[in-house]
Structure formats: C-alpha cells, structure tokens
Amino acid sequence: MVSIGAVSRIRETSAHWGTYLVEVSADGRDVVAARAHADDPDAAPAIGNVADAHRHRSRVARPSVRRRWLEDGPRPDARRGDPAEEYVEVDWDTALDLLARELGRVRSEFGNSAIFGGSYGWGSAGRLHHAQSQLHRFLNTIGGCTRSVGDYSRGASTVLLPHLIGARGTLDLRYKPASWADLAEHTDLLVSFGGVRRSNTWVVPGGHARHVGSDLARAVGRRTEVVALTAQRDDAFADLGAEWVGVMPGTDTAVMLALVHVLVVDRLADEEFLSAFTVGADEVRRYVLGETDGVPKTPEWAERISRTPAAAIRALAHRMAAGRTMVNVVYSLQRGEGGEQAIFAGLTLAAFLGQIGLPGGGFAHGFGSMGDYGVGVAGAPLPTFPQGTNPVPDFIPCARISDLLLHPGEEIPYDGTTVRFPRTRLAYWAGGNPFHHHQDLRRLRRALSTLDTFVVHETHWTPTARHADVVLPVAGTLERDDVAAGAGDSRLRAVPRVVPPRGEAREELWIYTRLAERLGADFAEGLDSRQWLERIYERWRAAPASPPAPPFAEFWRDGGVELPRKSYDDAVFTAFRADPVANPLDTPSGRIELFSATLAGFGLADVAGHARWREPTQWWGAPAAAEFDLHLLCNQPTHRLHSQLDMGAASRSTKVAGREPVRLNPADAAARGLADGDVALVRSPQGSLLAGVVVTDALLPGVAQMHTGAWYDPSAPEVADCVNGNVNVLTRDVGTSTLTQATSGAHVLVAVTRYDGPVPPVRAYEPPPFSR
Ligand SMILES: Nc1nc2c(c(=O)[nH]1)N[C@H]1C(S)=C(S)[C@@H](COP(=O)(O)OP(=O)(O)OC[C@H]3O[C@@H](n4cnc5c(=O)[nH]c(N)nc54)[C@H](O)[C@@H]3O)O[C@H]1N2
Ligand SMILES: Nc1nc2c(c(=O)[nH]1)N[C@H]1C(S)=C(S)[C@@H](COP(=O)(O)OP(=O)(O)OC[C@H]3O[C@@H](n4cnc5c(=O)[nH]c(N)nc54)[C@H](O)[C@@H]3O)O[C@H]1N2
Ligand SMILES: [Mo]
C-alpha cells in the first residue's frame, strides 16, 4: 500500500462496473491510478478507464452557456450541436440566475408540461447522488414536468410481460429468477437465445461488492449443456462451453415457433402443464400448424427466415424435451422491431416444455445480460432519495423522445392506450447521454433544434453536452460522499469522496438547492448533502423490511454493512406451480396467457393475442437488404459502460485505426476488399460512420458487429455523420411495436465499403470552442 506517514493514498470506491481501488496523488487532489480489488474474481476492464477520464481535458470545468443562446435568447436553433458553436464560461451565480429565469419563463408562459424532465440514463452508482432522482425531485418542487416511462434495456418486455404473467411475475422474472446455482444443480440443457456474455455481467445497476458471474458460470459449465443461438460465436462465456447455433439477428421468433411446431407435431409438448397452468395453447397450436394463416411454422420455414438449419432446430426440440431445460432470452432480442415477439415466443416455448416453476427449468430473461441476474439472493431494500410527486400527467415511453419534440400535439398508441405529445420548450438532462442511447442521431439533432432551451448536467463534454444551451459541471462519484449497493448485493457500502470536485464542479444537490431558492421553492429542506446522506440512511435503517444496521456514524466508520444473503423460496412461479388455484398469477385468467384476450382486444395490426412471426423492415430478407446487405449488431461494449469514460485507456485499447471497430466475417471482408486495420465507411439509410476493420470468423456471413458507446463526432460531415463510429447514426428510430414503443437499436441493415480518402482526426473528446 502506498502511504505518506499514516495517511493511506488508496481509497475504495464504487461504480456500476464494480467496487475497486483508487490511488490518489500525494496532495490528495488527483487520481493517479485505479485498479481492481485483489479478491475480485472477475473485475471489469472498465476500471482501467477511470484515471484518464477523471483528469481528461473533456471534463466540464465551469458553468458554460452557448453564446448564441446567451445573445439571441431562448429559441429553436438548428445550430445546436454544431462543432463550431461557441460557449461562454460564466460564474455559478450568473448561470443559476439565467437558468432560474428561463425555467420561470417556461413555467409561467407554457406550463410545466412544456418542461421535459425524463432524463433517461444510467448516470453513476450511488443512492443519494442518483442524477435522475435529484432532477425529478427538483422539477417536482417547481410544479413537475413531462416525464418518461420504461427503459432502453427491457422496454418491450416490461410492457408485454405483465399481460402474459402478471405484474408480480414480471418483477420476479427479473429479481427472483432461477439462479446460476439452480442451473448448475438441476439444469440439463440451457438454451440461450442471444449469447450469455461474460462482459455484460461485469455491470450491475448500483454495482456489486465483488463480481460473482464467472464463478457461477464455471459451475454451470461443469454439468449443464449449453446451446447459444446467436450470430456471434464468441458471444457466450468461454467457461460455459456453449455449442453455437447460428441465427440471423431479429429472426429468433421464427426459430422458437418452429421449436414449438416440432414439440406439437412430435407429441413432445407437456399437455398437462398447458391445460393446468396456461390459457391459449390451442390458439398457438393452430397458428404453428398453419391452420390460421396457411403457413405451417416448420423448421424448414424457420430456416428460410433465420438461416438456422432445419435439422438443428428439429434436433434441439427433441433435446429440450428430453430433460430439464431452461430457455433464456437475453435482453437484446427485444431491442428490435417486433422485439416483444421474441419474449412472447420464448415464454410460449418454455410453456410447451412444461417446466416453468420447476428448479432449473422454464423461462429466464437475463442470464448474461446483467451481473445481478440469477445471483440467487433476494435483494434487500436500499436507501432512496425521495423524489416527491409530479403533478403533470404527461409522459412518453422513453424511446419516443425525438417523436415528442418533432410531433407536438400528435398521438401514439402505447400499451392499449393513447399517449399525446405535449409541446416541449425546455428539456433538462442529468445522468444520461441521448447521443449514446437514442437511435438515428441525425433525427435526434433535428428534434433538439426545436427546443427553446436544452440544459445538461455533466461531468464531461459529452456529445449531449455539446448540444446544450446551459451546461453545468457536476461532481462525479469520486468527488462526493454516497452509499451504494446493487440488487442482490452482499454489502451496502459507504462510498466516501476520493478527491475534491474538479474545477468548479458542484454536487447536483447543491445546484438544485440554489435553483429552487431562486424559484421560491424548497428542494433541500435546509439540509446539506452530508445531512441528506445521514437522513436517507437512517430512514432506511428504521424501515421494518431493512436488515439490522448500525447508526450512520458507525456505518460510515466501518465502511459499510453486510446485507443478508437470503435465497428466496417465495418466487411467484414456485408457488404458482405448487398450486395454481391458491396462488394464481395476477393475469386476467390467473394463468400464463399464451393467448391474451386483452392484447387481442387492443386490435393492433402488429401485435396479436399470441406470439407471432411478423417480417420486420430490418432483417436480412427485407427489400432494403439489396443495397444494405449486411446486418449490423449494435451491442454492449466490453471495456466501458455505454459511452462512459470512452476516452480512458481500457476503452482506447479496443479501438482500431483510432476509432470504434467494426467486425466482419472473412468472406464479407474479402468481397469488399477489406482487411484488418482498414478504415471502413458504414452506411445505412439513416446515416454514415467511419470504423476500424476487424476480420473474424466468429460472425455469421452477412452479419457485422459494432459496440455502442463511441462518442458521436460530427466534425467532418463531408466524410460521414460520425467519424468516431457511434452506431446510433445508423440505427432506426422506430418503436418496437404499437404496443411497446421501445427502442429498436439492437441491429440495423448497413452497407460497408473501404474508405480510402484522407482519414479525418477524431475530435469527439475535445471541449467546445470558448469565447468571452
Ligand atoms: N444502438 C443501440 N443503442 C443503445 C443500446 C443498444 O444495445 N444498441 N442499448 C441501450 C441501453 S440498454 C441503454 S441502458 C442505454 C444507455 O444509455 P445512457 O445511460 O444514456 O448511457 P451512459 O453512457 O451510461 O450515459 C450516462 C451519462 O451520465 C453521465 N454521468 C455520470 N454520473 C453522473 C452524475 O452523477 N450526474 C450527471 N448529471 N451525469 C452523470 C455520464 O458522464 C454519461 O454521459 O443505451 C441504449 N442505446
Ligand atoms: N461491459 C458492459 N456490460 C453491460 C453494459 C455495458 O455497457 N458494458 N450495459 C448493461 C446494460 S444497460 C444492459 S441493458 C445489458 C444488455 O444486455 P444484452 O441486451 O443481453 O446485451 P447485448 O450485448 O446488447 O446483446 C447480447 C448479445 O445478443 C446478441 N444479439 C443481438 N441481437 C440478437 C438477435 O436478434 N438474436 C440473437 N439470437 N442474438 C442477438 C448479440 O450477439 C449480443 O452480443 O448489458 C449490461 N451490461
Ligand atoms: Mo440497458
């Protein structure tokens, strides 16, 4: 351990990618290095980004105001986000006065629904300084805002599943699913649609004390056979020893329906289970046999759609029926057009196998998607920062942000109801990066140009901050005291400040306290952040459901408190399986609805009462595939969380030709004259980017792959919309369906060619130009 005198220079901290150690400089002001705990069995490489990112020149140093907004006043402006837009640095009082005045103007002229405060995003770990909770509380104290519902992670599932398995079943499928240990003990065959990715388990919302995913997976790999259906061979944990079955992106529903077809035709379906625990099996049977639409969903039919060999589908159905089988559908499958159908069909397949509610059998939705999934521990309640109530009724499904701004007054269907878009004048974003998470960034830019004012709180000059009129620099996790834990965690951790805030950055609680004062509202109830920390901790400690915990001072001194490691035997499906009459699901029938009369009653063209294959516009068989002939997977990055700390060493180590890599199959690369290290121009009807080429036989022919999260760089528009490789310039901004309205960013059809012109430098991590 490095120390000066008695003072250690090594501090522990927590992020969504884990709990790790930070070494500070001798003067205590700077981060020198960050490294994993020696006893973390599978630490995330993202730790390697922290030190560089902390002191990077892209940190927002002072409150900054876009010069044109300052001079011309709040108004729609298509130049928002132009790399040449200048900012003026101002002192805090000036920034807060300007912003308070503008919030006051919008509130009184247009009402609070003209303020969009959805502010989707992951921000950073920590229960007090949770950026969205802070922002929502602030906006609620000044009369509320238009909000957003759902998420980009499972936005289609969380709307669909309550209709099929009830709200309680949906929660348990996330927080009390079969565990990795159940798999290792009971499961003969784990069939995963989408790879069970090790790198995704490095991340847990809120972070975990230690990473347990790879140990758990190793145990499963020893006994359980694993089949991963995906377009990427290296998509599953090496430790699982998974067999790879290729499937083209967006076509799994066809394969699942064909598996059901085989179970029905070969009399392998569990009829007793279907009649006791489900409704709608008859509708499904008629559909897969082709009685309703004249198209039997045979393995040969599915092969034509998915390119998965019919013989492999037939053999897999028989293997699945022969033992204890778990059907896992990873999150990404529902992040595409018609994405909820993959969940619907996966659940239907598991129901036809009849093992839902049995140990190690049935249906899972998250192995390999998130690090807390399947740890087998019922999450303890955690401290929360109270948000107050929002009196404004308006909301949008979160992935409809561009539609909200571009189509005020219009209505969209959503979950059987209608959502009407209010006219938005001001958007306030804290803790998210829409230029990371949203689709079709050209369209998003146009949408943001309609605002009078865009306010962003950030640690760094992200592409979103570069589109803002008012940018307020905030303290990051290393710069403030907090408490942290993730679902199913072993410890509620004290996370003390490691270094003082950089530049003039302030805690968001400080900012909102002063803004609220200026607007005649009370945000903080007279408490500072240290007092708030104690308050949320003590309120948590006093709650009846909380585990025993010491008073705050003792907790802080000890660095945390252990959380109970109680496994659950009260999951909804276990009780349901034991007695479906005494313990019904909270669905209209009390059973699993393989045909939902509610969904059928919505009368939607794109979602029926049962799982159904419907050709999306984005699949390899679509007409657009003549020109855009590669199917690009856009999935989670291994060496960072989303776009966070993309300028750090670990993330940089993955770049090729100085930008985000695009992976191509050797045949596809050869046909385009591309080799490792080349720069490729990747185009879709939505936009274009430059990427560095990696040739690999881990991909199916016809499939390319890029990670999300490279910072959007529009600095050379004559070459490409983004010269740094942000996939969301390519993706389509269409809802998953008129039922679910979630993101469909998981994949997109593209054309890839060599780029031989002069390669423009990447400017994404430069701060904007400043003027006085
Ligand atoms: N094409 C495509 N797009 C996708 C996906 C995909 O698979 N394909 N995945 C989607 C998914 S699942 C998700 S969850 C989203 C993720 O999208 P986001 O959550 O928006 O992405 P992040 O990069 O985590 O953005 C968080 C931002 O918060 C900032 N931040 C950190 N701490 C604080 C804080 O304390 N206060 C404030 N004010 N800011 C802070 C960080 O600097 C960062 O810019 O992306 C979605 N987008
Ligand atoms: N290291 C790291 N871990 C993360 C994150 C991160 O940014 N970095 N983000 C976290 C977040 S917010 C979330 S929501 C989860 C997301 O968890 P997931 O959605 O499970 O993650 P992805 O990596 O997007 O997709 C997993 C794999 O699914 C495959 N896939 C994509 N589309 C299809 C398809 O149509 N069919 C089939 N069969 N396979 C397909 C891809 O090959 C991809 O590698 O990950 C979390 N974990
Ligand atoms: Mo997510």
Image (cartoon, grey):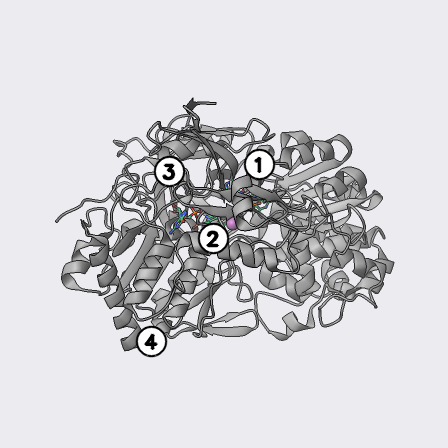
Q: Which residue is mark 3?
A: 499
Q: Residues within 10 Å of mark 3 (few under 14, many from 20)?
A: many
Q: Is residue 14 left or right of residue 644?
A: right
Image point (66%, 30%), residue name: 239
Indicate which label's residue lies in the foreground, 2 or 4. 2
Mark 3 vs mark 1: which is more N-terminal? 1
Q: Which x, y percent locates residue 725?
A: 37, 39
Tag 1 residue: 232
**Amino acid bearing label 1:** Gln
Q: Earlier in the sequence, mark 2 or mark 4?
A: 4
Residue at the disc numbered 4: 111
Q: In the displayed image of the protein, which residue is found farthest to the left?
A: 772
Circle 2: is it few (<14), some (14-19), or many (20+) Cα within 10 Å?
many
Density class for disc 4 (Cα within 10 Å; few <14, some 14-19, many ≥20) is some
For ligand 2, tell me if the residue under mark 1 lies within 8 Å.
Answer: yes
Instruction: From the image, tell me which residue sits under label 2.
Output: 533
- Identify the mark at residue 296; answer none if there is no mark: none
Callouts 4 and 3 close, C-beta under 8 Å: no
Q: Nearer the viewer, mark 1 or mark 2?
A: 2
**As rendered, which of 375 and 682 lies closer to the eye?**
375
Above or below, 422 relative to 386: below
Expressed as whole percent of the image width and height from the top left, the position of residue 184 reads 76, 37
